[in-house]
Amino acid sequence: MNWIKYDIHTTTQDADLIAAILTECGITGFEITDHVPLTEKEEKQMYTDIPADTGPDDGSAILTFYTEAPGNTEKTFYSTGSSLRDDQTEPDTPCLPPEEMVSIITQHILAQKTFAPIPIPKITFEIQDDSLWNTKWKENFKPFYVAEDILIKPTWEETPAETKPDDIVIEMDPGSAFGTGTHETTKLCLLTLRKYITPETKILDAGCGSGILAIAALLCGADSALCLDIDPAAVRSTKENMAANHIENNRICAMQENILENSDALQKKYGNTFDIAVANILADVIIPLSEYIGTFLKKDGIFIASGILAEKADAVETALSANHFDILEKNTMGEWVSYVAKPQ
């Protein structure tokens, strides 16, 4: 399917007014990009430990929106990973030739000049064919070893000739969910997790993403796994990767759940059930999670926490200690830290 991407180049001062004009034109989904520094509250709302780099504030802003290109004959939809563009499926979104769309927006801006005189912004557009994304993004995701005998292999790639018969091959199609094994945090979890697995091990994966940790654990010999995530796309991805790796349904369950908000109900059902709980999320989630996760573990269970920037490691250690965990291991890779902790 073809889409038209529009960029309206303006200033931060005029961005809100132009946004209102776009709404008048029937464009309800758009993105404003500027260099205004984020507040501390906004940083936390981004749900990431990686500080945002907005660059120097030069007063410029760009409003971006998408419309379906007129005359589409191919209606097959491909996700590009852009929630802004992927969400542009409203039936009443204007589907006009780009020159006509630019003219309509310009006329609306001119009509506002009596009340709020602003310069006519530069409006650019380009046609994008989303079918090109269907395979393009896969070019940089190739089979690789996360350990000497654990190979992560995209489902669309052939198994490398050098793969040994006893190697554990994990078929992985990440889709839109986090976790392919390439990131340091996932590698830390995978390498640590394996050391504690036995044939009786039951795993709780809090924030499962693609399901890679639970699937790897099962392929390494664990008994069963429960995967929880607040994102329905992650749950779908986990189930698809389960099937790709021929994991039986009775060995793994993936559910859309918020373990922080629904911990009481989950604890009643799964309390003191698991030998290992793993959370490869963020420090700001692991800290409150450490208050609840121990109730899901057996007496000698362990909690593996990863996704922690080194600068937040002390805060995580404090939280683990406050919630009666003893730290067994602290492992680092690059700027990331993981912990293995045991309830006291």
Image (cartoon, grey):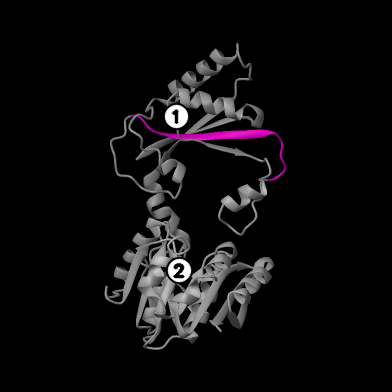
Question: Which sits in the foreground, 13 or 130?
Answer: 13
Q: Which residue is at a point 55% across and 71% down the rendered structure image?
A: 306
As drawn, 308 above or below 20: below
- Locate residue 187 relative to residue 313 in the image: left or right: left
Give how far across and how far down residue 174 sits, in percent.
41, 62
Viewer-nearest of labels 1 and 2? 2
Circle 2 crowding by C-alpha within 10 Å: few under 14, some 14–19, many from 20: many
Question: Which sits in the foreground, 101 or 237?
Answer: 237
The amino acid sitting under disc 2 is Ala
Q: Which residue is at a point 42% across and 48% down the rendered structure image?
A: 80
- Locate residue 341 relative to residue 88 in the image: left or right: right
Start and end of the magenta stretch? 55-70
- Locate residue 70 relative to residue 197 in the image: left or right: left
Give how far across and how far down residue 297 sits, in percent.
45, 79
As drawn, 316 above or below 328: above
Q: Which residue is at a point 39% across and 49% down the rendered structure image?
A: 79
Report the residue marked by disc 1. Answer: 27
C-alpha gap between disc 1 and disc 2: 38 Å
Q: Is mark 2 on a helix, strand or loop?
A: strand
Circle 1 crowding by C-alpha within 10 Å: few under 14, some 14–19, many from 20: some
Instruction: Indicate which disc, 1 or 2, sits on the residue closer to the N terminus.
Output: 1
As drawn, 28 above or below 342: above
The disc placed on residue 206 is: 2
